[in-house]
Amino acid sequence: MTTAHTVRKVGVVGWGAIGRVAGGALAAGGIPGAELVCIVDNRPLGEAAPAPQVSFEQALDSCDLIVEAAGQGVVREWGERVLASGTDLLVASTGALTDDELAKRLLAAGPGRVYFTGGAVGGLDLLQSVRGLGPLDSVTLTTTKLPSTLEQPWMDEELLDRMRSATGPVVVMSGTARDVPVKFPKSTNVAASVALAVGDLDAVRVQVVADPGALRTRHVIEASGPHGAYRFEVAHVPDAANPATSKVVPHAVLRSLAALAGRTGQIL
Ligand SMILES: NC(=O)C1=CN([C@@H]2O[C@H](COP(=O)(O)OP(=O)(O)OC[C@H]3O[C@@H](n4cnc5c(N)ncnc54)[C@H](O)[C@@H]3O)[C@@H](O)[C@H]2O)C=CC1
Ligand SMILES: O=C([O-])CC(=O)C(=O)O
């Protein structure tokens, strides 16, 4: 049986390191079955943008899929309205889901559907599959980045000094996937993504490490339980303009869009 496909009309919210690359590829026809219809950003984008810059409300009128590539605040502020308007939402800032109430509301909202991109980490599909065998005993994530990408307004001078003068790795926070993405909102969404796969924010122990030698951003996921042991390690080249974000992330968004547009064979 053949299925009639409609072209997904995509709006990108956030024209930064992720949005520009993902939106640019969409505008160039890189994802069969999906087209870039509009862009939302709180900064003026000028003539060079490949689709009209519109308000969020206008985007909801013209799109059937919104890609969030702007920050956790946008998911908090707009997530439910996107879904209630019947528009699907692909979320990059998964850290917003550490708020249980918001997560419940988003997962219950509709008729639009919410999706999460795997972003900078791999292995989420397998970790999600493992849930079928029962709970894991231990899940850890260690994220190592350049110190400048981890500086936060809540840090005291002593910690900032240690990070800035470090000659080797410095642990800047240890916590759970519930605590960490709130403290590093632009840098540790991956912790929430691992927790989404495992199904438990509190079960995922996270270490955030600042390392002046981290020319590549590393994420190491280790998990074990009665049924097996799992280890996924990535070392990404950071985006040149925004080294907090790994260069691969817009391509993870594009992969998610290809799956949603449903035009290619796909490992889901
Ligand atoms: N799941 C994952 O693995 C990853 C997730 N992220 C998430 O994606 C977000 C975006 O990442 P990048 O593109 O690297 O950031 P970026 O800082 O390069 O770009 C963000 C863009 O969003 C715009 N923006 C911010 N707030 C807005 C608002 N309220 N309304 C409209 N536009 C707004 C900014 O003006 C900017 O153009 C990050 O903040 C982070 O939460 C980032 C990297 C990996
Ligand atoms: O891009 C990365 O490596 C991870 C990142 O910034 C995030 O999870 O927010």
Image (spheres, grey):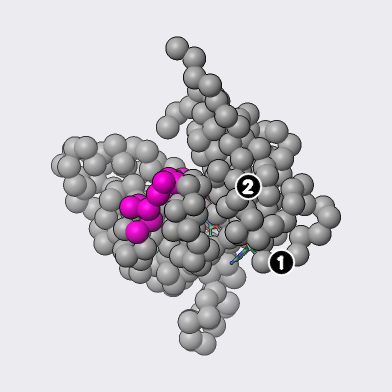
Image spot of residue 249 (x, y percent)? 56, 48
Indicate left or right for 90 with 106 as reference. Answer: right
Which of the two residues, 21 or 145, is positioned nearer the viewer here?
21
State yes or no: residue 115 in magenta.
yes
Image spot of residue 243 (x, y percent)? 62, 60
Q: CA distance from mark 2 to mark 1?
A: 20 Å
> How many badges with numbers are in the image?
2
Number of the label disc, if any, that sits on residue 182: none
Number of the label disc, if any, that sits on residue 62: 2
Which of the two residues, 126 or 70, is positioned nearer the viewer here?
70
Q: Amino acid at mark 1?
A: Arg
Q: Which residues are magenta?
A: 105-120
Judged by depth in the image, the label closer to the viewer, 2 or 1, is 2
Element class at badge 2: helix
Element class at badge 1: loop
Q: Are marks 2 and 1 in contact (CB under 8 Å)?
A: no
**Residue that appears at 38% across and 43% down:** 124
Image spot of residue 16 (x, y percent)? 66, 58
Occupied quadrant, residue 195: bottom left
Question: Is the distance from the Cβ of mark 1 to the nearest ligand 1 atom less than 8 Å?
Answer: yes
**Residue that appears at 63% across and 29% down:** 32
Q: Let me know if residue 87 appears in the view.
A: yes
Whether residue 113 is situated above or below residue 259 in the rendered picture: below
Indicate left or right for 51 with 119 as reference. Answer: right
Q: Classify mark 1: residues with Cα within 10 Å, few (<14), some (14-19) or many (20+).
A: few
Which of the two residues, 189 or 62, is positioned nearer the viewer here?
62
Image spot of residue 36 (x, y percent)? 67, 42
Occupied quadrant, residue 44: bottom right
Q: Let me know if residue 177 appears in the view.
A: no
